Amino acid sequence: MSEENTGTSLEQAMIDNVQEQAAEAVEATEENQQPQEELSAEEKEAAEKEAATKAAEAALGGVSDEAEGEGTGEASASAEADAAAAADAEYKSRLRAFTKELKKQPGQWYIIQCYSGYENKVKTNLDMRAQTLEVEDSIFEVVVPVEQAIEKKDGKKKVVKRKLLPGYVLVRMELNDAAWSVVRDTPGVTSFVGNEGNATPVKIRDVAKFLMPNDPTVSPEASAADSEGEQVVAMPEKEAAKAYAHDFEVGEAVTILSGPLASVSATISEIDPETGKMQGLVSIFGRETPVELSPTEIERIS
């Protein structure tokens, strides 16, 4: 063999050897990569399953939270309803007991009508006339029931009083000619409230609604008349009703929800555009009487 042929054969052998080694390297690489690709697919599938599981748990958790929220709201509404029912039952129980106590007192309760704003003067005059004309054994008690509250103004607390029966005075008495004459002729008195102008006794339960203290811990004796002749029957002092934004309108018919006038219908007569405070007309003993209304204590008549 010539030197040229020998060189060619060696060169070819080297090329073949390099190609073979390259092929083996590629094959080895493919063999090594195959498990990795399979492992990556398994990991991907596992990751997808894990993500799906987490998504399902999150969805279930959201539904559970929503259901729990609805349950909490229903429980809260139920608790408020139970509390309102309990408060109403407690109020009626105290009213029955207070009415029984009033029935033990001598005389009957009558309502006398007077000029609005003259209630205190009528009481003072009537008390003096009963003593002067010696009818104390027939006129036992004269009451101007008021509600006492604390009102905040300019950062300071101020005690305010509101008459529960503006234009009226309560009198406990034995009705006879002498007592009737003393009451009827008292300055400021316009008439007795009754049928056709005749003095008609008022149901004691109705009187009790205006005389019973709001606080069960306050005794009737604690509601003594003050220096102006008024008797504070709604004790202890409470926060005065605040002004609230509302959509009530003048002329609307509403029902009062709480207090001595609970369940009584009223017609809104005035609304303060700045504070939102309202005044309504209520029929008390056959006469339209203005009372202060709070949007939280009334509801529309549907």
Image (spheres, grey):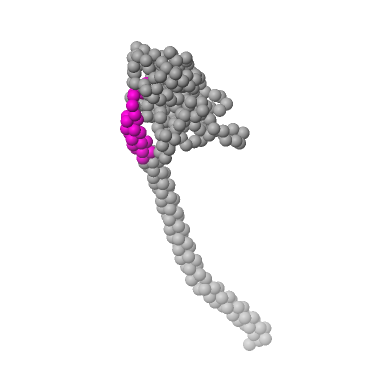
Residue 136 on image: x %, y % = 39, 22
Residue 106 on image: x %, y % = 33, 26
Q: Nearer the viewer, residue 302 or 44?
A: 302
Residue at 53% in and 75% down:
28
Q: Is residue 109 magenta?
A: yes
Q: Nearer the viewer, residue 21 or 42?
A: 42
Q: Nearer the viewer, residue 169 or 183?
A: 183
Picture mark count: 0
Q: Which residues are magenta?
A: 85-110
Q: Is residue 5 visible?
A: no
Rendered position, 37 above or below 155: below
Rendered position, 57 above or below 79: below
Residue 174 on image: x %, y % = 34, 21
Q: Quarter-wise, where is residue 286 in the image?
A: top left
Rendered position, 161 above or below 74: above
Residue at 38% in and 38% down:
87
Residue at 56% in and 76% down:
25
Q: Is residue 225 visible?
A: yes
